[in-house]
Image (spheres, rainbow, N blue to C red):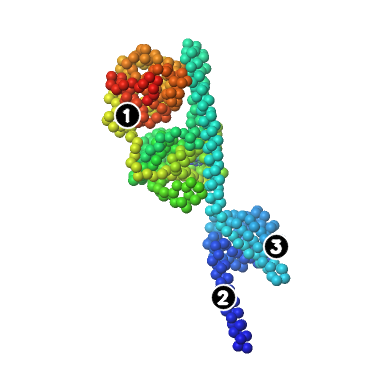
Amino acid sequence: MDDDIRSEQTRATTLTLDDAMFTAVMEQAVETILVTDTEQVVRYVNLAFTHATGYRGDEVIGQPLVSFLGEARYSSLGLADKATPTVGEVWRGRIVSARKSGTTFEEDVTITPIRDVSGQTIAYVRVGRDVTREMSLQSKLFHLQKMEALGRLAGGVAHELNNRLTVVNTTISLLMARFSEDAEAVSDCRDIVDAVHRSKELTQQLLTFSRHEATRTRAVNLKELIGDAEKMYRRTIGEHILIILAIDPDIPCVIIDPGQFEQVLLNLVINARDAMSSGGMLEICAKEAMLTAEELMWDPSARPGRYVVISVKDTGCGMTPDVKERAFEPFFTTKESGRGTGLGLATVYGIVEQAGGYVFIDSEPGKGTTVRAYLQATDDLPSQIPTSLVPESARGNNEIILVVEDDPVVRRSTARMLKQSGYRVLQAGDGKEGLWILNDSGKDVRVVLSDVIMPTMSGGEFAKRVRQLHPHVRIVFMSGFTGDNMVEQGVLEKDQTYYFVQKPFNGEDLLRVIQRAVRRAAGQGSDPVPSGTL
Ligand SMILES: Nc1ncnc2c1ncn2[C@@H]1O[C@H](COP(=O)(O)OP(=O)(O)O)[C@@H](O)[C@H]1O
Ligand SMILES: [Mg+2]
C-alpha cells in the first residue's frame, strides 16, 4: 500500500515536472508555435509567436486564425485548400505573415494535424520560422552575382569594341590628313569621328561599370571635393530644388579617384533632380560610419571597418521594389528615350565597388530615395594637391599656353586648371584654328597643349606645321592613347620629340609636363628623347 502511494506520488511528481518542462519547451522555443482546434480557432500561442507578431496570447486565444492572420492572404496562398481540417495532412510552405502593426515578414511554416488515439484530428499545430533575414541575404548575394556577371559582360564587350574603335580612330585621322583639301570628305570623316567619340564615351562608362577602368586612387578629403563640386550641381539642378549640405567637418579621408568621385556625386544628384520634377529637397550628407561583419554577411569578400558614408537623399517619386532591384543594371532606365541612358547608377556602382566600398538604395514610391555610398576611410592625409593650391614651384608665371582640343568640355576644364595654376590660356577647337591663333600671337605662346585625334587636322599634322612655323614653341600632346601607340599607328611622326600626357589626367600630371615644356621653351632643361613620351 505504501509502495503504491509512493509510486503514485512519484508518477504525479514526474508528470507535474513534465508539464512544467513541456510548457517551458513550448514557451522558450525559437520557432513560433500556434495551436488551433479543428475549427481553426486559436487555442495556444507561445512567446516566440508574440515576439514575432506582436499579438499577446490573450488577444488571439479563442479567435479564429483567419481573423488576425488575414483570410485573403491565407486563401491566396492555397492554405485554405491545403491546410483545412478536411485534408488533415501536413502542410509546409513559405508564407508572408502579418504583424499586429500591419508590417509583414516571411515565414517557413509547417502545419501539422494532431490526432487522438482513434486517429481523429483534434487540433492543428502551426510552427513558423522567420526567414526574412535569410531571404534578404539570399537576394543580396544573388544581386551581387548578377552584378558580377553583368560587369564581366559589359567589360568584355567594351574592351573588344575599344580596340576596334582605336583602329577606326587612327585610320580616320590618316584619311582626314590625306583628304584635307576635299571639304566634303573631311566633313564626312568628321561625322565618323563624332560617332567614334560618342561610342568611346559609352565604352568608357561600361569599363567604369565593370571596374576595368584605370583609376588613380588616393587619399581624398571629401569635404573639399564636395565643396568644389557644389557650384556645379547647384547649376545643374535649378531653383525649384532646395539643396542642403551636411558634411561632417571631421570626416577622415577616403581612398578613391577624385575625378570618379565627382562622377558618382553628379550622377546621384542628376537622378535626384529627375525624381523631383516639381521641386523638392536634396540633402547631401557625409559622415564617418562603421560597417560590421554582421551587416555585410551576404558579401563573401566583406570588408568590415571604418567608412565614410555619403548619402544623397531626395524627396522625389521614389522607386518600386522592382525598379530598386534593377536600378544598378547598365541600360536599365524608366526614363523616356533621350532622357535616360540607364548608365548613371551602373557607373556609381562600378566606381564605388572598385574603390572597395558599398552602395545601397533606400527607396519607396512616394517616399523619396536615399542612396548611400560607403567609401573606405583612411588615416592618410589627403595626397591630392588642389589645383588652386599648387606649390609655388609647379605654378606658371603668366606664360601663355594654347590649348587645342575639339571637345569643348575637356577644353574648358583644362583651360581652367591651367589658369588657376598661374598660366594664361588661349583656346582653339581644332588644328586650323590653332594655327590661326599662333600666326596672330605666336611669338608669345610658349607651349601648345594639343589633342591628337581631332577633326580637320590630326594632332600630328598640326604639330608638323607648328614646328615649321614656330620652332620656339613646345608641343605637349594629350590623348587617351599612349604616345608609343600613336607613333606605331603613324599618327605622330617617329623621331620627333613630344611631351605627352595621358588622358584622363589630373592637375598634377598635367602641370608637371607643362612645366617641363615651359622651361624647355625658355631654354632650360632638355627635350625628351626622340619619339619618347613623357
Ligand atoms: N533618386 C531616384 N529617385 C527615383 N528613381 C530613381 C532615382 N535614381 C534612380 N532611379 C531609377 O533608377 C533608374 C536607373 O537610374 P540610372 O542608372 O541613373 O539611369 P537613368 O537616370 O539614365 O535612367 C532610373 O531610370 C530611375 O527609374
Ligand atoms: Mg541617372
Q: Position of residue 287 (x, y in %)?
A: 38, 46
Q: Secondary structure at mark 3?
A: loop
Q: Position of residue 198 (x, y in %)?
A: 50, 27
Q: Which mark lies nearer to you, 3 or 2?
A: 2
Task: Please rate how many residues cluster around mark 2, counting C-alpha atoms within 10 Å: few if below 14, some from 14 to 19, many from 20.
Answer: few
Residue at point 40% right, 35% down? 216
Q: Nearer the viewer, residue 76 or 47?
A: 47
- The residue type indicated by label 1 comes to Gln
Which quadrant of the figure has residue 484? top left
Q: For mark 2, what is the residue?
A: 17
Q: Mark 3 or mark 2: which comes first in sequence?
A: 2
Asked whether residue 480 appears in the rendered view, the answer is yes
Residue at point 71% right, 61% down? 87
Q: Secondary structure at mark 2?
A: helix
Ligand 1 under 8 Å from disc 3 Cβ: no
Q: For mark 3, what is the residue?
A: 88
Q: For mark 1, what is the residue?
A: 420
Q: Is residue 435 above or below residue 198?
A: above
Q: Position of residue 498 (x, y in %)?
A: 38, 21
Q: Is residue 36 left or right of residue 357?
A: right
